[in-house]
């Protein structure tokens, strides 16, 4: 490839990266705004919005609600998504493609359509505004990500290793624990992280099934931004941006280490 072409493609990639990251990076200076405004550029410097996030019960409670729900969703979705991935991987019939398509439909169906359906079901089962309701709804949304991540690991997994272990006398549990699980660990970890972030970040379904007694952080952010221009939302966004970046970095490092070993 000629040098001018490489330079042009590099500039295009840089412009796309700036376009994608600019809205996220703008919230960082806004979070230190001295005035109660979301205007950019900010005027002055203050930590008050970070202090408000940690001291205001509305913010701290919604944050811990999101953490609790996301942690439960990550575990449940990883277990169910992994079982589904194994089941589809072991299926020999043509129905596996149809089942896979059905399992990933929550990714392609408009969120508001799912939210209306979930809300209608929850009204009858009294799950609106409950931790159980949030966990079940978000697990439905997170399973496709786990399924895709684990399925990708299983596609490159050499099943002859399981056969060799069985021929040496290892039972299925031992084979899974010592051979299969370590080799698909990067996919499991990716699925776990995606499930956690999917739940922690979800807003559409949460708006339908929330209650005054149980608000997640995205709902609190939405409520705050529609009520007044509170720079606390920028502080929250900055914290989440840093935390998400760290989580993804850790996941990539663990995945790279697994590949080297």
Image (spheres, helix red, strand yellow):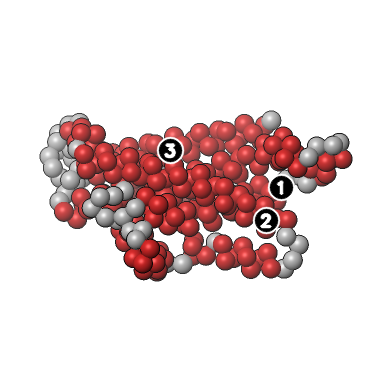
* Total residue callouts: 3
As measured in the structure, the alpha-carbon distance from the residue carrying label 3 to the one carrying label 2 is 32 Å
**Residue lying furthest left:** 35
Q: Position of residue 71 (x, y in %)?
A: 44, 42
| Residue identifier under label 1 | 156
Q: Residues within 10 Å of mark 1 (few under 14, many from 20)?
A: few
Along the line of sight, the residue nearer the viewer: 108 or 124: 124
Along the line of sight, the residue nearer the viewer: 191 or 30: 191
Of labels 3 and 2, the one closer to you: 2
| Residue identifier under label 2 | 87
Instruction: Give the mark, 3 or 1, whose residue is nearer the N terminus.
Output: 1
As measured in the structure, the alpha-carbon distance from the residue carrying label 3 to the one carrying label 1 is 27 Å
| Residue identifier under label 3 | 245
Instruction: Give the mark, 3 or 2, whose residue is nearer the N terminus.
Output: 2
**Residue lying furthest front:** 125
Residue 205 numbered mark, or none? none
Along the line of sight, the residue nearer the viewer: 231 or 83: 83
Answer with left or right where residue 76 lies relative to residue 204. right
As measured in the structure, the alpha-carbon distance from the residue carrying label 2 to the one carrying label 1 is 16 Å
Answer with left or right where residue 228 lies relative to residue 27. left
Q: As displayed, is residue 76 above or below residue 47? A: below
The residue drawn where x is 69% and y is 37% is 177
Q: Position of residue 250 (x, y in %)?
A: 50, 33
- Mark 2: secondary structure: helix
Q: Residues within 10 Å of mark 3 (few under 14, many from 20)?
A: few
Q: As displayed, is residue 192 above or below residue 130? A: above
3 and 1 marks in contact (CB < 8 Å) = no
Q: Quadrant of residue 100?
A: bottom right
Quadrant of the image containing the C terminus: top right
Q: As displayed, is residue 44 above or below residue 4? A: above
Residue 23 visible within the image = yes
């Amino acid at each position: 490839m000629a040098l001018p072409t490489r330079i042009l493609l590099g500039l295009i990639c840089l412009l796309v990266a700036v376009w994608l990251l600019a809205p996220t990076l703008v919230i960082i200076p806004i979070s230190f705004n001295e005035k109660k405004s979301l205007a950019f550029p900010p005027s002055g410097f203050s930590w008050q919005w970070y202090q408000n996030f940690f001291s205001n019960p509305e913010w701290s409670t919604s944050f811990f609600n999101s953490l609790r729900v996301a942690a439960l969703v990550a575990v449940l979705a990883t277990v169910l998504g992994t079982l589904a991935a194994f089941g589809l991987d072991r299926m020999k019939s043509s129905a596996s493609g149809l089942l896979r398509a059905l399992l990933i439909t929550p990714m392609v169906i408009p969120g508001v359509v799912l939210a209306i359906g979930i809300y209608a079901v929850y009204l009858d089962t009294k799950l609106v505004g409950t931790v159980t309701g949030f966990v079940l709804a978000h697990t439905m949304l997170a399973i496709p990500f786990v399924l895709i991540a684990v399925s990708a690991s299983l596609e490159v997994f050499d099943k002859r290793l399981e056969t060799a272990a069985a021929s040496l006398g290892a039972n299925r549990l031992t084979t899974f624990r010592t051979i299969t699980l370590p080799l698909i660990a990067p996919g499991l970890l990716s699925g776990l992280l995606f499930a956690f972030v999917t739940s922690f970040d979800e807003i559409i379904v949460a708006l339908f099934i929330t209650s005054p007694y149980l608000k997640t952080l995205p709902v609190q952010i939405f409520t705050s931004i529609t009520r007044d221009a509170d720079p606390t939302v920028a502080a929250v966004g900055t914290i989440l941006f840093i935390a998400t970046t760290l989580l993804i970095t850790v996941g990539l490092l663990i995945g790279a280490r697994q590949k080297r070993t």
